[in-house]
Amino acid sequence: MKKTVLVFLALASISMLLIPTVANAEGGERGWLYRDRLEIGRALIEVQSTNWPSIMPYYTNDIEYHDAIVDIYGIETMTAFFAQMFANSPNLVTTIEDETLVGGIYSATWTMAGDFAGVPYEAKGVSIIKFRGWSRKVYYQRDYYTEGDIMASIPGLDEAIGGFRTYYRCAVDPTFDCPLNSTARQIASETHPAEDVVGPDESEAKRRGRWWLRRRRMEIARSLVEINADNWQSLLGYYAPDIEYHDPIVDIYGIETMTEFLARLYSSSPNLITTVEDETLRGGIYTATWTMVGDFDGVPFSAKGMSVVKFPRWSTRVNYSRDYYTEGDIMINIPGLDEAVQGFRVFYRCAVDPTFDCPLENPALAGLAGEQTRSDEMAAAGLKLRQNVPNPFNPVTEIAFQVPDGGMNVSLRIYDVSGRLVRTLVDGYEPSGARSVSWDGKNDAGGKVASGMYTYRLTAPSFTESRKMLLLK
């Protein structure tokens, strides 16, 4: 009996020694997984044309990806999507601002700058990335940004997005000097004073503890994202006096301006309902994805978006909030603006979506859409088309191309956005070597063409390649 007791005590002692070791190993594994997921999430957001193939192994074979326009399913389609996107945006650079990782959900806000199909643009956005359980593999990604940031740089579309943004700001932005005349609809609203609703100060929050603070922040942030016409006044006290708010169009600073903004917004959208889908809270940063349904000034719309809400240290009052969604989801229901949005979305999908049956059939528009036909043998032999310099340009630009040894018959033609032939620059035999030709912004008849985006297309036997250029006057 005594011997049995001694053996039991010995085993118990060994078990007690092992328990911390196992716990530490598990904690270390979780720590490594957290750090790896953070690095992977960061890499997938800040991916560039020079390294995108290296990040593909981080995705699962059944990866699901969405942005404002495109829906991608499966690793093969995702690979083709990246290839097409960076072919049209070779200098795209994305820089992360804020990031959070809670469990298997990584989210980050970012700024993006570069060219799309030769058109320079800048945009702000937010992404959500989901990892498989206890895995470093990503099975879901969604990017939220507004296509209006790209449309604003494209002649013809810039007027449509500029007009909508002006109309929207006239309706809801109390800081905006509205240029619309008196016949345009003006939304009048009273400024409702903010109510002092929120209770505990920093010392009270510390006394109740971090878990209480977390639950309270989650409740408050969710209510501010799902705010509506019936309760917005009662929720004003959850904002700090120095609240800062942004959406794709307006920038609000201070509780008085925020109060009037909400009053105007719900005067224009009395039936607006927002429903949270996924949410995370880490530290003082809350993020949520949502769907939004309602009317804006009588125009019905449905949109998906994401919000970032920030709390100061040990506080339950929000001092920063940003909503991400695309204006196109509203504009597409407005006659006169719908065609501009639909046209851009077709153009964008032709350029980057490998699943899209592109309706742009003629050679020029196929080039605009990023559809290029190249013979591997011809490309290897040295036939190449260069990007024009400068781009954008006014009044003259140079287009360079390389002809392989022995020379060959080639054509270099310029098309407008409707696919009409504007100018034939080269049509015949060209000797080998580096060639260059200038375009002065005139058509074949000698007339000056309008500002806008044009496609130039190099064609030879078994070889076709197109690039885009922007004429600005």
Image (cartoon, rainbow, N blue to C red):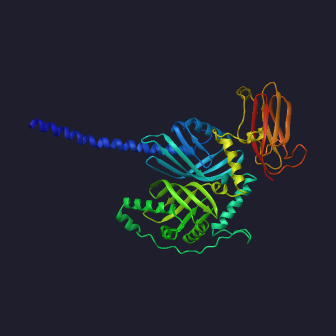
Q: Classify the position of the N terminus by image quarter.
A: top left
Q: Quadrant of residue 297?
A: bottom right
Residue ranking furthest to the right: 445
Please state the horizontal and vertical placement of residue 373, each as a whole percent of the image: 72, 33
Please state the horizontal and vertical placement of residue 390, each as a whole percent of the image: 77, 45
**Closer to the camera in the image, 92 or 57:** 57
- Describe residue 35's horizontal placement relative to residue 464 as left or right: left
Would you say residue 202 is visible in this rendering? Answer: yes
Reply above or below: 254 against 44: below
Would you say residue 383 is visible in this rendering? Answer: no
- Describe residue 242's horizontal placement relative to residue 21 as left or right: right
Identity of the residue drawn at 76% across and 53% down: 156
**Closer to the camera in the image, 440 or 61:** 61
- Describe residue 11's horizontal placement relative to residue 428 as left or right: left
Identity of the residue drawn at 61% across and 45% down: 70
Q: Quadrant of residue 182?
A: bottom right
Residue ranking furthest to the left: 1
Reply above or below: 373 against 442: above
Q: How many marks?
A: 0
**Closer to the camera in the image, 209 or 21:** 209
Please state the horizontal and vertical placement of residue 436, each as a whole percent of the image: 82, 37
**Closer to the camera in the image, 412 or 221:** 221
Please state the horizontal and vertical placement of residue 409, each as a whole percent of the image: 83, 29
